[in-house]
């Protein structure tokens, strides 16, 4: 599923603002240079800080969450998301660390779908399928950023125009994503989009979390609850079969808090296909309003992450393809299952499954969704 060196002065500023100790109790948003892309586009880093000292840094390259620092039960802060110390790490081959994913998050079978009687062809960049928007998805684009902070609510707004035909998708798609850091230690992500031609859209964020702190071992002891009675089972290439299968009596039953590692290596077909968990859970939504999708706790630190969303699905991924070849922040090695992802979404391959919730967006309509990552400690 799935992020080298700036000048010493710039890196020092990053350490001071984004990666060092929390920047005090004054809430707000700060902007600084984060370098340039290989073709010379300027990239910025935005630091959001709330009154509790929680700090989130986001770059307009890929709309990427670069750092997210929260306290444990003793008030000690740690960075909870995998990533890199500088822009160069994100410019190379990396597994979507912290990125905004689109135009279509997750997989589309064989890189093809039919809409309005026309078959569209996408890049086949993952086992013969299209993954996360193709070869140069939203995670590899420089977004236009604007500080839209309000009192006690540091926020940045990112916009991008995905042109008709980009990566094979139809329609000029105008996308807006707003990141806000609320007083209650909530990172809120509001997504919206409009189009001038029928198209398909599925936007998400691909942050890799370790509540003990990034680079602090694996996540197998984290206790996971997912509010879902069913999953969309997949074939060997991780494309949904079209079924909605009950989690009852399977390793996918997280309706009660269970250690991520308790059953992850069971000899079970779906786990074998994913090399662990890499599946879409059908959330138990009662309405289109926010509802609790998942709750994760980390025993040693006491940190808690709750995920609330308006989306119908949640991709739970356990970093099965991290293999120790990536050196992240401070040179830390990211090994297998060093983090988990909680990608709120519509279902994978929905354009090819009429019984799945539709991802079609038409002119005059607005794609809109909200996800909240709420942090606390117990």
Image: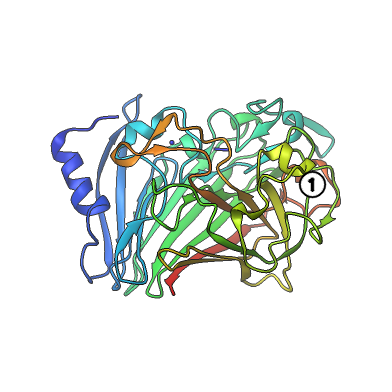
Which one is nearer the viewer's eye here, 368 or 355?
Answer: 355
Residue 135: give x, y in percent of width and height.
Answer: 56, 28
> For mark 1, what is the residue?
233
Which one is nearer the viewer's eye here, 21 or 57?
Answer: 21
In the image: residue 243, left or right of residue 359: right
Residue 339: give x, y in percent of width and height.
Answer: 50, 48
In the image: residue 376, left or right of residue 220: left
Which one is nearer the viewer's eye here, 10 or 336?
Answer: 336
In the image: residue 48, left or right of residue 247: left
Which one is nearer the viewer's eye here, 183 or 198?
Answer: 183
The colour mode here is rainbow
Counting every numbered tag in the picture gives: 1
Q: Quadrant of residue 123?
A: top right
Q: Residues within 10 Å of mark 1 (few under 14, many from 20)?
A: many
Report the residue at 61% width, 34% height from top: 164
- Work out which quarter of the rendered image holds the C terminus and state it: bottom left
In the image: residue 109, left or right of residue 24: right
Q: Residue furthest left?
A: 9
Q: Quadrant of residue 178?
A: bottom left
Report the residue at 75% width, 28% height from top: 110
Residue 224: give x, y in percent of width and height.
Answer: 60, 62
Report the residue at 65% width, 39% height from top: 171
| Secondary element type, mark 1 | loop
Is residue 343 shown above or below 152? above
- Work out which quarter of the rendered image holds the N terminus and state it: top right
Is residue 325 shown above or below 291? above
Residue 258: give x, y in percent of width and height.
Answer: 63, 63
Is residue 39 shown above or below 344? above
């Amino acid at each position: 599923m799935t992020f080298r060196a700036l000048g010493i002065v710039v890196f020092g500023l990053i350490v001071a603002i984004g990666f060092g100790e929390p920047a005090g109790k004054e809430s707000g948003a700060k902007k600084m240079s984060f370098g340039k892309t290989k073709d010379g586009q300027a990239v910025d880093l935005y630091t959001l800080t709330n009154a509790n000292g929680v700090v989130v840094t986001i770059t307009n390259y890929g709309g990427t969450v670069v750092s997210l620092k929260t306290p444990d039960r003793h008030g000690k802060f740690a960075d909870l998301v995998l990533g890199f110390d500088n822009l160069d790490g994100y410019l190379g081959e990396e597994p979507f660390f912290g990125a905004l994913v689109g135009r279509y998050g997750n997989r589309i079978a064989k890189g093809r779908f039919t809409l309005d009687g026309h078959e569209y062809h996408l890049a086949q960049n993952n086992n013969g399928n299209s993954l996360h928007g193709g070869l140069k998805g939203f995670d590899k684009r420089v977004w236009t950023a604007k500080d839209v902070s309000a009192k006690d609510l540091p926020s940045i707004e990112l916009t991008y125009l995905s042109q008709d035909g980009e990566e094979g998708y139809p329609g000029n798609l105008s996308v807006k994503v707003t990141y806000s850091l609320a007083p209650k230690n909530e990172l809120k992500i509001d997504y919206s989009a409009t189009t001038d031609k029928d198209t398909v859209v599925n936007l998400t964020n691909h942050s890799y979390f370790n509540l003990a702190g990034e680079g602090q071992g694996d996540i197998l002891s984290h206790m996971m609850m997912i509010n879902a009675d069913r999953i969309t089972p997949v074939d060997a290439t991780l494309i949904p079969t079209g079924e909605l299968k009950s989690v009852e009596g399977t390793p996918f039953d997280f309706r009660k808090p269970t250690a991520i590692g308790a059953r992850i290596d069971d000899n079970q077909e779906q786990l074998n296909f994913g090399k662990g968990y890499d599946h879409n859970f059908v959330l138990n939504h009662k309405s289109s309003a926010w509802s609790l999708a998942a709750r994760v706790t980390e025993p040693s630190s006491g940190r808690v992450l709750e995920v609330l969303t308006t989306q119908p699905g949640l991709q739970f991924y356990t970093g099965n393809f991290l293999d120790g070849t990536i050196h992240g922040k401070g040179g830390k090695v990211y090994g297998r299952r060093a983090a988990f992802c909680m990608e709120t979404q519509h279902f994978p391959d929905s354009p090819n499954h009429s019984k799945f919730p539709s991802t079609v967006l038409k002119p005059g309509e607005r794609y809109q969704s909200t996800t909240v990552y709420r942090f606390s400690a117990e």
